[in-house]
Amino acid sequence: MDIEIRSFQHTSDISDIEGVRILVRHQLTFIGYEPDQHDIEAVLSNAMKPESRAVLWVAYLQDKAVGIAFGNVCCGLESGGDYLWLNELYVAEEARAHGLGTHLLAEVQRWAKESGCTYLAMVTHPRNERAQNLYKAEGFELESLVWVDKYL
């Protein structure tokens, strides 16, 4: 499998923006949202705005976007400096079970380390055993915690 992974910090740099929009739509649908085209464009535009420290990784298989990872560089006292919060990791259904998630995660880790991040964190749904198995296999600690959030 010939996989190419590219990182982007601005949507204007993404030549295959439509392929990325399709993956974002599938990922948002997977987690329970029903986005329309306008929602997808707004979410990408906001996530990748110029002042953001966000990064989008796109995995291509034969020039087709088949996976994405999206993260933000944050700064924390507990982490001792910058860290990467991995918001999303999604592989298209037809490309699953071929190691693509592992490749994406490895590239995210490489980029974060080269960019001076000291730590990588994320959450996944307690029932998403496939993702948990991937993270365990890649040496991540899985901890029980309570997620706290509020829409403003």
Image (cartoon, rainbow, N blue to C red):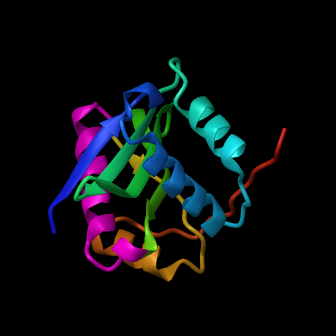
Answer above or below: position of 46 versus 93: above
Dominant SS type (magenta): helix
Q: Residue at x 81, y 47 (%)?
A: 150
Residue 119 place in picture, x, y as percent: 37, 45
* Left or right for 27, reference 118: right
Residue 71 place in picture, x, y as percent: 46, 43
Name the residue nearer the viewer: 80 or 105: 105
Q: Residue at x 60, y 70 (%)?
A: 125
* Left or right for 82, reference 128: left
Residue 38 in view: yes
Q: Quadrant of the C terminus?
A: top right
Give yes or no for residue 98 being in the magenta stretch: yes
Q: Which residues are magenta?
A: 94-117
Residue 11 place in picture, x, y as percent: 46, 31
Q: Residue at x 56, y 61 (%)?
A: 27
Q: Residue at x 55, y 66 (%)?
A: 124
Answer above or below: position of 86 versus 41: below
* Left or right for 126, reference 98: right
Residue 26 falls in image quadrant:
bottom right
Name the residue nearer the viewer: 101 or 24: 24
Q: Quadrant of the N terminus?
A: bottom left
Name the residue nearer the viewer: 141 or 31: 31
Q: Residue furthest top?
A: 51
Name the residue nearer the viewer: 29 or 110: 29
Residue 4 place in picture, x, y as percent: 21, 52
Residue 128 falls in image quadrant:
bottom right
Residue 80 in view: no
